[in-house]
């Protein structure tokens, strides 16, 4: 048996969701099966299944995500502090009732060593590890037209309940908005930016700011700048 759920407000397509996918364990079995769709973003959000097949906007989403992940790669992976993940890396948290694919994630080696996050191999193949389970150190979401409520209202408390210390929220659809949130007493509190728009990232131990410049073709180019905290 299966249930049908609408994909988004602007599409007539439908996604066939198995009945037991409305529990965390059942959703994880669906994700790890051959029947799980290869495209689209499908999330389990504390008892609800959200399916979004909207195409990713190039100018306000894809290039932003690349710019952020590129710099985080330099700050984290190239210094052998941990790993950076983007695109189709699933994050699960049984305590938060969460299974989703963040735009970017950072997990430090120390967090792995303390058992706060782990790789979750696929049941289909022992060589395939598409999922992180637990509490990575930093999660980034870039807002799109179809994800506004999810990124700003639904996901933050779920990420907080998962124990993720830091959350970045970016909205580049019009004026550029870049916010850093840190976990305090189980909830996210915004880190107030300082002079020049520099914002302290407690996880990275440095100040960051996201800027954009016009390319010679008139498009936006994004740069995640960083400097040592004084």
Image (tube, grey):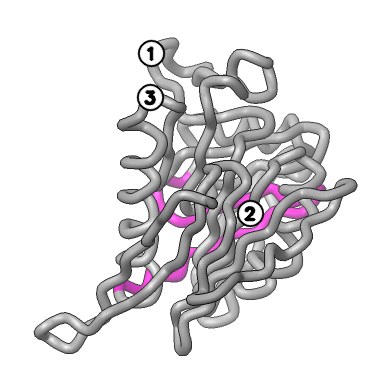
Q: Mark 1 sits on what residue?
A: 127
Question: Extreme left residue here?
Answer: 216
Give the magenta range: 37-58
Residue beneath the point at 47% across and 88% down: 175
State the image coordinates of residue 132 (x, y, percent, origin top left). Answer: 56, 29
Label 1 Cα neighbours within 10 Å, binned few <14 / some 14-19 / many ≥20 = few
First in residue order: circle 1 vs circle 2: 1
Question: Extreme front residue here?
Answer: 230
Q: Mark 3 sits on what residue?
A: 80
Question: Extreme top residue here?
Answer: 126
Q: Is residue 212 magenta?
A: no
In 3D space, how far apart are the residues under numbered discs 1 and 2 (Cα atoms)?
30 Å
Q: Quadrant of residue 169?
A: bottom right
First in residue order: circle 3 vs circle 1: 3
State the image coordinates of residue 172 (x, y, percent, origin top left). Answer: 45, 78
Decide if residue 160 is on the left or right side of residue 67. right
State the image coordinates of residue 18 (x, y, percent, origin top left). Answer: 67, 43
Residue beneath the point at 68% across and 63% down: 191
State the image coordinates of residue 128 (x, y, percent, origin top left). Answer: 40, 20
The kind of secondary structure element at disc 1 is loop
Q: 158 or 207, which lies in front?
A: 207
Q: Mark 2 sits on what residue?
A: 167
Decide if residue 4 is on the left or right side of residue 69. right
Q: Quadrant of residue 68?
A: bottom left
């Amino acid at each position: 048996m299966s249930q049908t759920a609408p994909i988004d407000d602007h599409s007539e397509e439908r996604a066939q969701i198995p009945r037991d996918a409305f529990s965390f364990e059942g959703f994880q079995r669906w994700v790890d099966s051959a029947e799980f769709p290869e495209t689209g973003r499908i999330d389990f959000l504390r008892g609800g299944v959200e399916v979004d097949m909207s195409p990713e906007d190039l100018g306000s989403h894809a290039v932003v995500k690349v710019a952020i992940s590129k710099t985080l790669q330099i700050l984290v992976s190239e210094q052998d502090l941990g790993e950076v993940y983007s695109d189709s890396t699933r994050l699960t948290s049984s305590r938060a009732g969460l299974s989703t694919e963040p735009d970017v994630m950072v997990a430090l080696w120390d967090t792995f060593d303390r058992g706060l996050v782990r790789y979750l191999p696929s049941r289909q193949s022992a060589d395939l590890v598409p999922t992180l389970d637990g509490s990575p150190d930093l999660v980034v979401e870039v807002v799109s037209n179809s994800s506004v409520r999810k990124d700003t209202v639904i996901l933050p408390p779920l990420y907080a309940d998962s124990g993720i210390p830091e959350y970045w929220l970016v909205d580049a659809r019009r004026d550029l908005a870049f916010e850093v949130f840190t976990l305090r007493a189980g909830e996210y509190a915004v880190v107030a930016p300082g002079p020049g728009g520099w914002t302290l990232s407690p996880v990275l131990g440095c100040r960051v700011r996201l800027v954009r410049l016009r390319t010679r073709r008139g498009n936006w180019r994004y740069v995640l700048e960083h400097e040592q905290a004084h």
